[in-house]
Amino acid sequence: MFRSKAAVIGTGFIGPVHIEGLLRAGVGVQGVLGSNLAKSQATQAKFGLPRAYADLDELLADPEVNVVHITSPNRYHFEQTIRCMDAGKHVLCEKPLAMNSTESGELVRRARLAKTLTGVNYNVRFYPLCIEAATRVQQGLLGEIFHITGSYTQDWLHQDSDFNWRVLASEGGPLRALADIGTHWLDLVQSISSLDIHSVCADLHTVFPIRKRPVGTTETFTSKLSTAPKHGVEVPIDTEDFGSVLIRFGNGARGGMHVSQVMAGHKNSIRWEIAGSQQSMSWNSQHPDELQLGNRDTANQTLLRDPGLLSEPARSHAQYPGGHNEGFPDTFKQLFRAFYQAIEHPTEQSGSANVSRLAAYPTFEDGHREILLCEAILQSATERRWVDL
């Protein structure tokens, strides 16, 4: 058990995921803040938490709370993060860190001066086989990296009657699919390969320029379960449903990725493939316990997530025996363990970044880098050209 106690801002799809992950990681959750007191109280009752906060002032005044998790809509991240940092709280913020690089750059500046720790929730880093992949790259088992390709695809916005605040640029920012899910892929492959992206060339497409907004609200991933009428008010959409990006990495390697939130049958699928001079690797989040290893002159292999078969960095983030799958909720637990370990045992954490960027929790610098990437992607798509970072 950790000594720290957390409070969570946000009661939509991802807020309760944070609460559950914190409890599983051994972190006490003191309370929750929703967009109104009724939502705070409903989530408090669901998880049996001590407090349901009426507003942010009440949360920040709670002396029991020393860490705040921010899972509110994107447009609130900057202000809420500043207020939490000014109150002396550690902060773990959902991605994107802010609405633009001016805001995220200011948060990085403040984080460097703060006595508290700050992080961004790129939880996908913490699938054990992604950590295993990073270790294999660092050990030179792949050789020189030639190219990295992949995708992140979903179908929860597959119909024009599917609606959520994320589809509006005023709520989530000018990029949606790329900022919401594409940044997970971009962060993940850079962490695995230890290569930074230097240039991008992007194409964006809005499949549904008009969507039907139902009466009431729909939470992320729940639109097809909503009982709200499907013949809602027609709303112009100013964010992309699909995007593709050509990539040039710092070592000269090439890459490409696409994201879609309108791909039927793909519920939440992250795929990456890395081609090296000695070996290739590939992975799919919908089969998270399998890492495919490709060879030219010998048989291909499938590495199953079994602690007894993994490298030490990956083994430390795999808590169940082989054959007992670890998936999406476990990545939150493992990221939170890394973050709270750094808060309570900073000297033990200091060497973790030497293992790989993957094995350490993502920082505000990582969140800022992803926003710079998003802005370069948007500029590229708008101006129809390559853009250097």
Image (cartoon, helix red, strand yellow):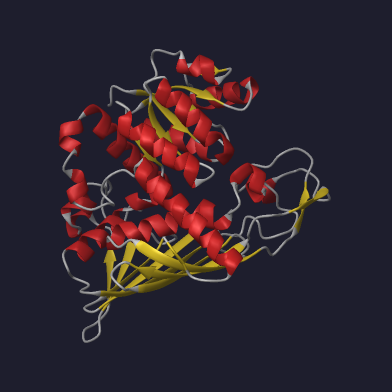
Quadrant, the C terminus: bottom left
Can residue 142 be seen here? The reply is: yes
> Residue visible at 60% across and 48% down?
221
In the rendered structure, the answer to whether residue 221 lies left or right of residue 307 reads: right
Tally of numbered tags: 0
Residue 6's quadrant in the figure? top left
Tell me residue 146's x, y (percent). Answer: 30, 76
- Is residue 122 positioned above or below 251 on the image? above
Tell me residue 309's x, y (percent). Answer: 19, 60
Compare residues 254 and 329 and report the one nearer the observer: 254
Compare residues 49 and 386 and report the one nearer the observer: 386
> Residue visible at 40% across and 41% down?
120
> Residue visible at 22% across and 65% down?
137
Can residue 289 be seen here? The reply is: no
- Is residue 174 positioned above or below 242 on the image? above
Quadrant, the N terminus: top left
- Furthest toward the bottom, the residue is 297
In the rendered structure, the answer to whether residue 152 lies left or right of residue 39 reads: left
Tell me residue 140's x, y (percent). Answer: 17, 68
Tell me residue 61's x, y (percent). Answer: 46, 13
> Residue visible at 34% across and 37% down?
336
Residue 379's quadrant in the figure? bottom right
